[in-house]
Image (tube, helix red, strand yellow):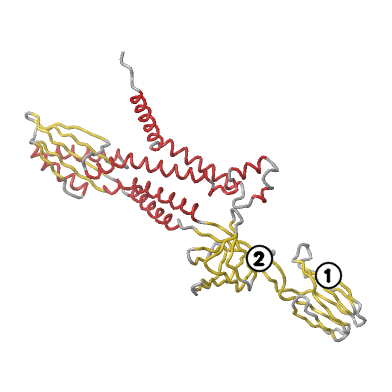
Amino acid sequence: MKESRPSEAVSKNTASLSSTIVKFFTSVRTTITLLFLLALCAIIGTIIPQGELSHTHGMAGQTFSNRLVLILDLNNVYRSWWFTSLLGLLAFNILGCLLKRLPLIISEWKGTKKKFSFSVKFMDSRSPENLKKLLISPIRNMFKGDPTIVDRAGSLTLSWERNRIYLWGFPLIHVAIIIILIGGLIGVFWGFRGHVQIRVGDKSSNFGLLSTGEIRELPFTIMVDGFTLTKYPTGEPKEFRSDVRLVASDGQELKGSILVNHPLTFKGISLYQSDYRLIGLSKVNLTVKNEAGATETFSVSPMEPISIKEPATQIRVRGFDPGASQRGAGIEISVTDKDQKQTTLRLYEKDIEPVKVAGLKLSFSGYEPTYATGLQVGYDPGSRVVWLGSIMLILGFILTLFTNIQRLQIELIPEKNRTRIVVSGRSKRLRKEFRESVESVLKASLEKN
């Protein structure tokens, strides 16, 4: 009895493992499974807030769910190791499917191996040469061109083909998806997202990463020249815009406005309008009416004194409430009369009746706020790669959806005193109609003549 050698067993195991790996990366079932898992990840990324630091999830270690979120990076799904691994596996899987079918596509393009979807046969008493002249004319009208003719020892083969460019739709789509995935992975590993908050009139070149909170420096300085907030009649924010200047160390400068969904890009880094915060006042409008009926409106900065001559009084704005109550925004003021007696009170913007104190009627009639704008900082070095892949993907879909490869081959084979006619054809779409049209034309030509 012949025994197998250890080297042969190892060789067989290696071949079996290689076959399993190749089968995995060339399987459509693998593609569907990976797409399902990526869709599941997208659902998780939608449900769990992304980009938040660990303390926003209640400190790691308090509950099992919090620990699970942090261990699996569920608060940073699209940059987690397992999500990028799925993208990498999908890229290799699509590449495997492409390499599996590419030789067949190249063979079809060159004509060395032709694929047909139907075949019909006829018999006729005329010679192949006579039938050639008879059949070329009607088929030429269908394909708008003359055939390629091959003569093999008396047997004639007539071939027509159009829209052969369709064959490259499949590989173009697959290459495009791979390029898009590569661009996404480049963005994941070498890109970043951060946030910076800058007071109007100030500047900054630092920002904090959303994923870790690490402070990084930009290659330019952000100068906020102004911030505009537009509200609906209900008081809800309608639009907020930051007017900025971006100044690089080499003196290059870009001036523009950043709005929601309208970012500003400089040195490859994009700035998005993210949020804003009311941090104080620049001016307060205070209306003062004395006992004689004289009314005057003052526009002053916080802590700037207002001196009233009649009666002799001094007023200062000491605090501000942005409007947490139904009475709207409010201010805290101190009123000092001629006897140096000081009274502290609150005025609200929506109060109809003025407040009486020290012989005066005071009303809070408005303010000029000071804002800090919140900007999201984004850098994606893979964006151009993704754009390239997207363009290729569109071209691939155009070739696949809007072109229709059609191929017809007629073989005229002499047999004793007659000729066997073998008709083979292919049409990617409307196969039944194409076949019926070819059969109808051929039968009509053979019967007519």
Q: Position of residue 328 (x, y in %)?
A: 76, 66
Which residue is tagged 1? 346
Q: Position of residue 437 (x, y in %)?
A: 24, 41
Residue at the far bottom in the pictured view: 309
Crowding near pointer 1: few (<14 within 10 Å), some, many (20+)? some
Secondary structure type for disc 1: strand
The structure residue drawn at horizontal position 56% and vertical position 47%, both measured from the top left corner, is 77
Image coords of residue 38 (percent x, y)? 50, 43
Q: Residue lying furthest right in this view?
A: 339
Please tell me in which quadrant of the rendered image residue 13 appears. top left
Mark carried by residue 232: 2
The quadrant in which the C terminus is found is top left
Q: Earlier in the sequence, mark 2 or mark 1?
A: 2
Q: Nearer the viewer, residue 194 or 387?
A: 194
- Name the quarter where the N terminus is drawn: top left
What residue type is disc 2 on?
A: Tyr
* Residues at discs 2 and 1 in contact (Cβ within 8 Å): no
Residue under the image location 62 percent in, 52 percent down = 52
- Residue placed furthest toward the left: 417
Task: Please state which of residues 38 and 8 is positioned toward the viewer in this rendering.
Answer: 8
At horizontal 69% and vertical 66% (from top left) the residue drawn is: 278
Q: Nearer the viewer, mark 2 or mark 1?
A: 1
Lateral position of residue 133 relative to residue 409, left or right: left
Does residue 358 appear left or right of residue 177 in this picture?
right
228 is higher (above) or lower (below) than 133: below
Left or right of 176 in this view: 291: right
Task: Give the spatial CA distance, label 2 vs label 1.
Answer: 27 Å
Task: Bin the neighbour count of mark 2 within 10 Å (Cα to Cα): few under 14, some 14-19, many 20 and up.
Answer: few
**SS under mark 2:** loop
